[in-house]
Amino acid sequence: MKATDVKDLAEFFRQQGFTAVKAELWANFARHVFQIYWSAADQLLEQENWEAFKQKRGAVGKPKSVGKKVVQIPIEDAITSELGNFANLLRLGLPTRHFLRTHEVKFECEALVPSKTRAGRHSKKVDFRACAQTAVGAPEIAIEAKPITATGDIAGRYLGTEGIGCFFSAESAYTTGPLGAMLAYTITDPLVSMRDHVHTAMGLYKPSPEKVEKVLLTDTEWVTCTSHLRDHSMQPIAILHVERNFPLIS
């Protein structure tokens, strides 16, 4: 892939109408937030932690045949709760002058979504939310996770009403702010990436995104970033499409 095919994340935000200062701030925020979640996933996948995870009640689904193997699929909610726990511990251990500390960024897992029509146990929950608590309008991101075990899950779960559709809901949009993310738990054996398939699918998604671009979320790794207009007087939203691989359990 040519370097010119991939944009800087701050540049994408500037094209969304952010000022140069705001674009750089939000881009740095997104990078640091996902560094925490990537480190959390690394910790979960360490051999000792992964073995312990597999033994937990509710961690894996029932055995099923895949080809000539009998496997179990890690359950989405279980992965989410484990990542949330590791992320909180990583956040607590950050040095004093770290970006996430100076901007008072709070991490939440299975957080209630504010709504004009739902309350209490009827409220919807977003898998992850990170928000700076320095001022009203400070950076924040809502992240919805969806498992992908085959390409068919992209059109089904990932792009469905309970997937990316959660950012467009009239009654309980997972964020009314300008930034969200879809996190694919790609669960396959052998480990394969669905990143290119997701990028292609977003180009065909209806209603059509305003933009479908590849942006750098780290120094070397690109992700898809899409921008969308929204109804119900909500501001437009940029959605990052990120992926983390997890193994089938055999």
Image (cartoon, helix red, strand yellow):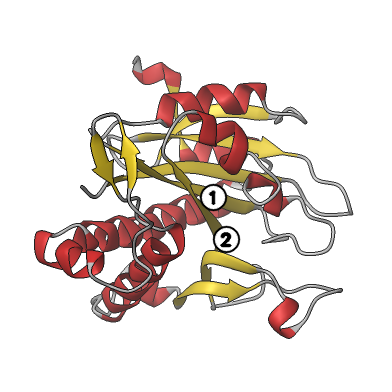
Q: Position of residue 223 (x, y in %)?
A: 43, 35
* 213 w.r.t. 244: above or below: above
Task: Give the alpha-carbon distance from disc 1 to disc 2, as whole Å.
Answer: 6 Å
Question: Measuring 25% from the left and 75% from the top, which residue is drawn there?
Answer: 94
Left or right relative to 29: residue 54: left
Disc 1 crowd, CA 10 A, few/some/many (<14, 14-19, 20+) = many
Q: Which residue is mark 2?
A: 142
Question: Measuring 29% from the left and 81% from the top, which residue is drawn there?
Answer: 92
- The amino acid pointed to by label 2 is Ala
Q: Residue furthest right?
A: 232
Q: Residue furthest bottom?
A: 120
- The amino acid pointed to by label 1 is Ala
* 231 w.r.t. 90: above or below: above
Mark 1 vs 2, N-terminal side: 2
Q: Position of residue 198 (x, y in %)?
A: 50, 30
Quadrant of the snapshot with the N terminus: top left
Q: Which mark is residue 84?
A: none
Question: Measuring 71% from the left and 39% from the top, which residue is drawn there?
Answer: 228
Q: Are marks 1 and 2 in contact (CB under 8 Å)?
A: yes
Left or right relative to 87: residue 145: right
Q: Position of residue 165 (x, y in %)?
A: 70, 47
* 192 w.r.t. 126: above or below: above
Q: Position of residue 246 (x, y in %)?
A: 29, 47
Dot 2 falls on a residue whose secondary structure is strand
Question: Measuring 21% from the left and 57% from the top, which residue is drawn there?
Answer: 42
Numbered circles on residues, count: 2
